Image: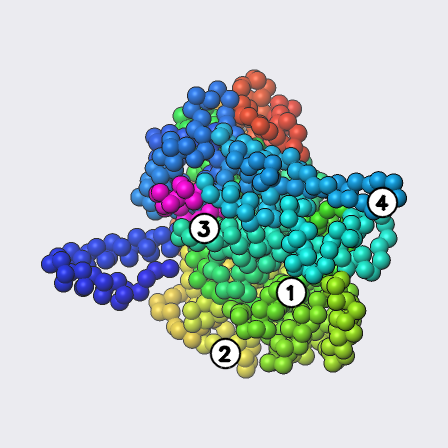
């Protein structure tokens, strides 16, 4: 947070008075300080990236060169994750937390600061937390049930033996027990020693997604369980038996066990981890998904909740390509509701930043284009994310032969990526969006209860881990629950998820930071009595609640169930009027904001921003192109902001009471901000839709010259009809680089000097367009259309289009030639189906202009 000038001015006056330093010098110092703080505050708007240090085999020259490249490309910061090393580089490995490693870390932070980059770091190596100092007594634990003749089962604890995944040299070892604070403090102690001696300027510590497999016990679990739940779990071990039917008592006991696991993960790991970061003035980033707990509470305990956009999905955008090798059956399909699990607690508790691990396995290595990245960025913003972290940008020596050092999982955003030269365009788009999104607050009015209790009342051996890669299989997002969420969204209501703990906190006025008016409780069976009482307390102070179809039937907790169930039913008696057969129909009778643009196939997020109301709107379907949109508010002025072109425009509005009607064009794949305010922006042009009436087909008779790339420059080509440049020349089938297309065209007098639009059709993958020696722009996202300003077009015109393709064809060439680029320890390099990577049998990937190309005027 940037300090107030007055506070710092007074400090400098005092210092000047006591030390006789000229006030001009101090004022200059103050300006530098405030500029530095402002720059640091701003760099969260720029995208950051995971920055894997393989073997921590880094050196100062390459660190400096890496950082300079990322700064120049428009990154805001990097996140250091030490991992396994590169074969042949063993002499350069640096052990984690050794004096040499800390020297490299401090150097990195200082150099990054000079370049206005921030640096985060994983509080460990690889994932999850663990390592060389984790002995069996500190390690993750599970248990067996041991049976003897005619005796009840006996619980025998044991360690899971899981090792840290992708560990760096000097940090290999067992995974930490996350359910015991003493073990967690033991793990953190080595970092305490390091940062107590030298509090290196890391911005945030990081904990990756919970992948502690099989851990469902801790040494003193029996004692902790009795302290929390009031009875002996050891007398009820039959709940862990592998059977298909359970009594109601057994369900309640298992739920108590799962609740205890959840509380231990929160209280003995997550909160101490966040407190440790705060102790040293750092932020805490945490990927809570995958955890065997209520992820809403775990996310809420950290400075920056971090979600994950893992995998690929088929967007309903013309020409959008989903990698056909991605297996939804194996890995699931990304879902915006997963993102909201992190953004919801941020909204509820007023946290400024919601980060996302973004583009993990969006496509196979060497096959991801910027046109595939932008829709998932937009969906991330729609899900409440405002702090993008690319996954990722591997550290590599700048002189390492292409493709350099690589992480095993895509997508590669480092300077060896085929889209590196065009990446600043995406980076600037993200910065422009996040500048607005980070400086605005949620305007969601609806909270939706997170029904974790129904899941926890289904006993099994082990714990329920919140898998977000495939939410249809993780238990909570049942068909019924997903239908409710879809109905709310389709009807135009914006909402956040809320947990039992958070409802209780709201009722005690310990929060919220939002503008919530309505609580929706889905059709469920179980609810804690304390939650029900908290809901009634909220209702008594003006909150509204709707129960979907029926009231919950049972309360939770085995110990006092006989007393609590009648009390629960008594509390329910006064809530029958709040049951609604249709939640959406009932909500339409309330005074809630409902956005009708959702009915047009437009997705949005609505936020409060300064003196107005801000909408980020994305068209990710083929329903809307242009037409009238209605909004309801009392603001005087309405503006559009295009984060790609960076243009603010005033849009004409037709008013009817509180209803404002605008005529907007937004093609499938495009996005825009709408801003309603009472403050007039001066000197803005007026938004207008260009209705082009004429069309020229420019798809024929192109010349192509290859300019720069590898492995060799192919021969020039001529196209009567546009097609992939890989078809005409075998050498072009391996080419990775740039080709320049040339053509001429004539126009009638009514087109000369007039504004126009060029529609490039199918571009593989980016296209920089020049007309009459004037750069028009670069098409890098769908749709591949560029606006041509007035004064450019003449009766006789020449056009050049510089196209960049994917690098997949060159990697095929390297694998055919058996070049030794896959030289990494651990998992080495795998493909999108986690099979050993081999591109030698790939078909050539289409490259260049595929068309058709039209000029609209």
**Can you say which quadrant of the picture contains the N terminus?**
bottom left
Q: Earlier in the sequence, mark 4 or mark 2?
A: 4
Q: What is the C-alpha distance between the residues marked 3 and 4?
A: 48 Å
Assign a secondary structure to mark 4: loop
Q: Residues within 10 Å of mark 4 (few under 14, many from 20)?
A: few
The residue that disc 1 covers is 500
In the depicted view, which residue is nearer to us: 660 or 341?
Answer: 341
Write down the quadrant of residue 42 in the picture.
bottom left
Assign a secondary structure to mark 2: loop
Q: Earlier in the sequence, mark 3 or mark 4?
A: 4
In the depicted view, which residue is nearer to us: 632 or 186?
Answer: 186
In the image, is 93 to the left or to the right of 446?
left
Q: Earlier in the sequence, mark 3 or mark 1?
A: 3
Q: How many marks?
A: 4
Residue interval drawn in magenta:
191-206
From this view, report whether residue 834 is shown above or below residue 818: below
Residue appearing at x 26%, y 62% in the figure: 8
Q: What is the C-alpha distance between the residues marked 2 and 3?
A: 43 Å
In the depicted view, which residue is nearer to us: 75 or 695?
Answer: 75
Magenta span contains residue 193? yes
Farthest residue, direction top = 817
Q: What is the C-alpha distance between the residues marked 2 and 1?
A: 35 Å
The residue that disc 2 covers is 634
In the depicted view, which residue is nearer to us: 224 or 495?
Answer: 224
């Amino acid at each position: 947070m940037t300090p107030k000038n007055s506070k710092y001015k007074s400090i400098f006056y005092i210092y000047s008075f006591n030390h006789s330093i000229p006030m001009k010098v101090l004022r200059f110092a103050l300006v530098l300080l405030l500029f530095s703080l402002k720059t640091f505050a701003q760099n969260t708007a720029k995208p950051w990236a995971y920055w894997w240090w393989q073997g921590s085999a880094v050196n100062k020259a390459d660190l400096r060169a890496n950082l300079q490249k990322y700064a120049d490309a428009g990154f805001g910061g990097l996140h250091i994750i030490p991992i396994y090393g590169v074969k042949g580089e063993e002499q350069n490995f640096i052990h984690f937390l050794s004096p040499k490693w800390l020297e490299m870390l401090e150097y990195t932070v200082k150099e990054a600061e000079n370049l206005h980059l921030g640096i985060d770091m994983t509080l460990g190596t690889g994932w999850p937390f663990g390592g060389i100092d984790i002995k069996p007594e500190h390690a993750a634990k599970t248990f067996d049930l041991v049976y003897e003749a005619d005796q009840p089962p006996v619980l025998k604890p044991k360690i899971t033996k899981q090792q840290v995944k992708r560990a760096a040299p000097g940090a290999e070892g067992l995974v930490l027990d996350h359910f015991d604070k003493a073990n967690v403090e033991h793990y953190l102690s080595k970092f305490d020693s390091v940062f107590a001696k030298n509090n290196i300027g890391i911005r945030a510590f990081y904990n990756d997604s919970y992948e502690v497999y099989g851990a469902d016990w801790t040494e003193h679990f029996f004692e902790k369980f009795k302290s929390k739940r009031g009875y002996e779990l050891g007398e009820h071990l039959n709940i862990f038996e592998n059977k298909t039917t359970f009594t109601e008592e057994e369900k309640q006991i298992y739920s108590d066990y799962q609740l205890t696991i959840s509380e231990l993960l929160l209280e003995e790991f997550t909160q101490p981890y966040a407190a440790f970061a705060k102790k040293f003035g750092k932020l805490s980033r945490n990927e809570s998904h995958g955890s065997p707990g209520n992820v809403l509470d775990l996310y809420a305990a950290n400075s920056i909740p971090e979600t994950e956009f893992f995998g690929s999905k088929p967007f309903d955008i013309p020409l959008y390509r989903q990698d056909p090798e991605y297996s939804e059956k194996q890995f699931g399909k990304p879902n915006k509701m997963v993102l909201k699990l992190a953004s919801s607690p941020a909204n509820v508790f007023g946290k400024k930043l919601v980060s996302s691990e973004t583009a993990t396995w969006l496509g196979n290595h060497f096959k991801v284009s910027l046109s595939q990245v932008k829709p998932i960025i937009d969906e991330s913003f729609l899900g409440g994310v405002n702090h993008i972290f690319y996954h990722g940008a591997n550290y590599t020596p700048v002189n390492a032969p292409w493709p350099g050092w690589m992480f095993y999982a895509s997508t590669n955003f480092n300077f060896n990526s085929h889209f590196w030269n065009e990446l600043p365009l995406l980076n600037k788009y993200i910065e422009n969006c996040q500048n607005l999104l980070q400086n605005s607050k949620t305007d969601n009015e609806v909270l939706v209860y997170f029904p974790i209790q129904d899941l926890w009342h289904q006993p099994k051996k082990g714990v329920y881990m919140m898998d977000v890669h495939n939410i249809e299989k993780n238990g909570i997002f049942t068909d019924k629950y997903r239908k409710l969420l879809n109905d709310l969204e389709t009807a135009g209501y914006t909402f956040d998820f809320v947990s039992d703990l958070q409802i209780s906190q709201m009722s005690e006025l310990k929060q919220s930071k939002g503008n919530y008016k309505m609580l929706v409780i889905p059709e469920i069976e179980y609810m804690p009595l304390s939650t029900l009482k908290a809901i009634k307390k909220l209702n008594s102070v003006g909150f509204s609640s709707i129960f979907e179809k029926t009231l919950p039937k049972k309360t939770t907790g085995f110990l006092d169930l006989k007393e609590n169930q009648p009390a629960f039913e008594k509390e329910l008696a006064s809530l029958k009027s709040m049951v609604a057969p249709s939640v959406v129909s009932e909500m339409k009778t309330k005074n809630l904001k409902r956005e009708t643009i959702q009915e047009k196939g437009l997705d949005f997020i609505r936020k409060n921003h300064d003196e107005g109301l801000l909408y980020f709107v994305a068209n990710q379907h083929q329903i809307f192109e242009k037409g009238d949109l209605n909004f309801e508010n009392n603001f005087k002025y309405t503006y559009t902001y295009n984060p790609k072109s960076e243009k603010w425009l005033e849009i004409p509005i037709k008013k009817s009471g509180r209803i404002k009607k605008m005529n907007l064009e937004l093609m499938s794949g495009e996005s825009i901000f709408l801003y309603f305010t009472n403050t007039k922006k001066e000197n803005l042009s007026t938004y207008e839709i260009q209705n082009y009436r004429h069309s020229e087909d420019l798809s024929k008779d192109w010349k192509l010259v290859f300019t720069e790339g590898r492995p060799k420059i192919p021969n020039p080509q001529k196209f009567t009809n546009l097609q992939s440049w890989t078809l005409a020349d075998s050498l072009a089938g391996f080419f990775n680089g740039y080709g320049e297309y040339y053509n001429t065209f004539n126009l009638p007098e009514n087109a000369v000097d007039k504004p126009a639009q060029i529609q490039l059709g199918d571009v593989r993958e980016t296209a920089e367009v020049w007309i009459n020696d004037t750069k028009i722009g670069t098409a890098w996202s769908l749709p591949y259309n560029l606006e041509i300003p007035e004064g450019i077009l003449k009766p006789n015109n020449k056009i050049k289009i510089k196209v960049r393709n994917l690098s997949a064809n060159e990697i095929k060439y390297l694998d055919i030639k058996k070049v030794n680029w896959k030289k990494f320890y651990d998992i080495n390099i795998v493909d999108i189906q986690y099979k050993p990577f081999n591109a030698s049998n790939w078909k050539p990937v289409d490259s260049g202009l595929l068309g058709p190309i039209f000029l609209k005027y």
